[in-house]
Amino acid sequence: MVVAYNAASAAQQTNNPFDTALSQYDRAVHYLDLPAGVIEFLRYPRREFSVNFPVKRDDGRIEMFTGYRVHHNTVLGPSKGGIRYSLAVDLDEVRALAMWMTWKCALAGIPYGGAKGGVVVDPKTLSPRELEALTRRYAAELIPLMSPHSDIPAPDMGTNPQVMAWIMDTYSMTVGYSVPAVVTGKPLNIGGSQGRNEATGRGVIICMVEALKRWGNVRPEDIRLVVQGFGNVGANAASYAHSLGFKIVGISDITGGVYNANGLDVPLMRNFVAEHGDLNGYAGGDIVTNDELLTLPCDVLIPAAMEGQITGKNAAQIQARMIVEGANGPTTPDGDDILNERGIYVVPDILANGGGVVVSYFEWVQDLQAFFWDAEEVYRQLQRAMVRSYYATESVAEEYNVDMRTASQILAIRRVADAVITRGIYP
């Protein structure tokens, strides 16, 4: 017998990301008339893979590392999801991220299920040779799971196109021929897609622009943005918003943040990070902590760092009128409750940051067909996909009289559940 688990209650008391994911699911599925067995089925990951593997360090030592890969659901197609390298990686985090990927893919209308993976490691402590050795050994452990038609990894926090190239090569050497479609987010010269690196951040801003239409005819230069996180998502979101004329007044990374009420020079900041590795020492504004950054005066806040940043402890101090989530799971359920009570409009993660998986899908399709698009075509298709998902979610929010997060999950869960019911339960 399966014992019922009160995820909503647990999520109020902890910042466990899987508790948060389950709590969000329970809130949304409450609005759907689904068989109890289907509701229960969708709460569980399909499979969870844990590996422990050795890596030889440059000094000759052999060190053990732990990695994970979780497939949440594969009803709509092969599982899709990033791989992150971080000391914060644990099984519950990977479970949550895999579940969010299921809803993200369904919401975007692409034929994937959700997966996620990770290794418990700080990649900055590894030499290039050690990083390659760790990646190839982890990829070798995942060979039983991976293929272009079963599980397709992608970059995430702490990983990049080069890491994807090593994974692709490891898989290809194992099967005996080149298989570009086994991963996405690769370098262009081995089957990557134009626009993939920029896709998630660009998609965040596309959603923001549509959401801002709720305020009437606003001018970009009158809208102040704060971006938490200056990795791939945050930096590309800030850059695209800056190019459209929006005023970026606050930006942070893991070392802290910078605030300038008159606006920050985003290209200069990206050059500084490229040269120094992070924002520490950047002198273009007032120094603030990451906690302070979240509560700065602004019109739009874009949390694009880690999960669990906006909680019951700080949601009441947030001054933004709108939050557009670039990170996965940046807001806890108790934080959501406070934001909703205060009338702060939240464009949720599985909608706002879906641009990455949308263009990953484009890359996969291009690899399978060996026919590649130019950047203009990728961006045109991305714009169409993000705008379509935004208004589909807004329509559900109006239909059920719920917030956008609940609406996005209602729509995604309904699509996955319908597929489960149509396919039936094996055997």
Image (cartoon, rainbow, N blue to C red):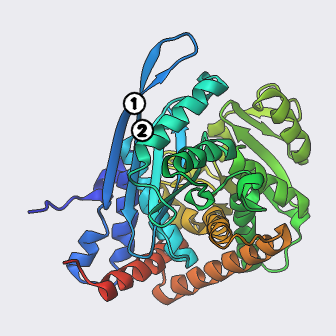
Q: Residue drawn at (83%, 69%), measured in percent from left and top?
A: 374
| Closer to the camera in the image, 152 or 104 | 152
Amino acid type of the residue that numbered disc 1 sits on in the rendered structure = Phe
Left or right of residue 36: residue 385: right
Crowd tier of the residue under label 1, counting other residues whose Cα lies within 10 Å: few below 14, some 14–19, many 20 or above: some
Figure quadrant of residue 216: bottom right
Q: Percent x, y for residue 76? A: 43, 76
- Which of pointers 2 and 1 indicates the residue nearer the eye? 1
Q: Residue drawn at (89%, 70%), measured in percent from left and top?
A: 219
* Secondary structure at numbered mark 1: strand
In the rendered image, which residue does mark 1 sit on?
Answer: 53
Q: Residue drawn at (44%, 17%), measured in percent from left and top?
A: 62
Figure quadrant of residue 290: top right
Seen in the picture, residue 95 relative to 421 is either above or below; the reply is above
In the rendered image, which residue does mark 2 sit on?
Answer: 67
Q: CA distance from mark 2 to mark 1?
A: 8 Å
Quick one: label 2 or label 1, which is nearer the N terminus? 1
- For this orientation, the residue located farthest to the top is 59
Seen in the picture, residue 115 relative to 365 is either above or below; the reply is above
Q: Residue drawn at (73%, 54%), measured in percent from left and top?
A: 197
Q: Percent x, y for residue 419? A: 38, 83
